[in-house]
Image (spheres, rainbow, N blue to C red):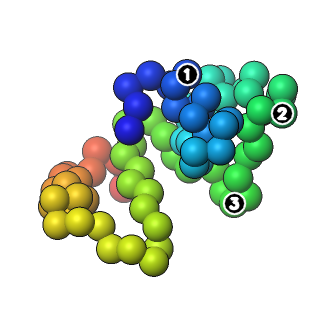
Amino acid sequence: MFSDSTDMLRAAATGLGAAIARERIVAPWLASGHLQRLPGTPMAGRYAYHIVYPSHRRPRPAVRRVIDWLVAQPSTRAA
């Protein structure tokens, strides 16, 4: 987990994992070739949370509680 987007992008660029970032922030990294866009549909990002973990491992109980809490929060999206 990173509190700074530059640190997150630098970690992804060095091969430590994938990063989810706003287009305007990641654009220079993509243009320079330091990062590559992952295949698939872009994700909605404004005021959203994304939890990523390996599909072959279940989250620890504490992480599962956070996931369950986030999912239970009321949505502010228009129907």
Residue corresponding to mark 1: 6
Please rate how many residues cluster around mark 1, counting C-alpha atoms within 10 Å: few if below 14, some from 14 to 19, many from 20.
Answer: few
| Horizontal side of residue 37 vs 31, given as left or right | left
How far apart are labels 1 and 3 at the CA level? 23 Å
Pick the front one: 71 or 51: 51
Residue corresponding to mark 2: 33
Quadrant of the image for the N terminus? top left
Pick the front one: 52 or 43: 52
How far apart are labels 1 and 2 at the CA level? 15 Å
For residue 7, above or below residue 12 = above
Q: Secondary structure at mark 1?
A: helix
Residue 69 position within the rendered picture, expressed as x and y whole percent measured from the top left? 16, 56
Please rate how many residues cluster around mark 2, counting C-alpha atoms within 10 Å: few if below 14, some from 14 to 19, many from 20.
Answer: few
- Check if mark 1's residue and mark 3's residue have beta carbons within 8 Å: no
Q: Say which quarter of the image contains residue 23.
A: top right
Q: Earlier in the sequence, mark 1 or mark 2?
A: 1
Residue 59 position within the rendered picture, expressed as x and y whole percent measured from the top left? 29, 67
Residue corresponding to mark 3: 40
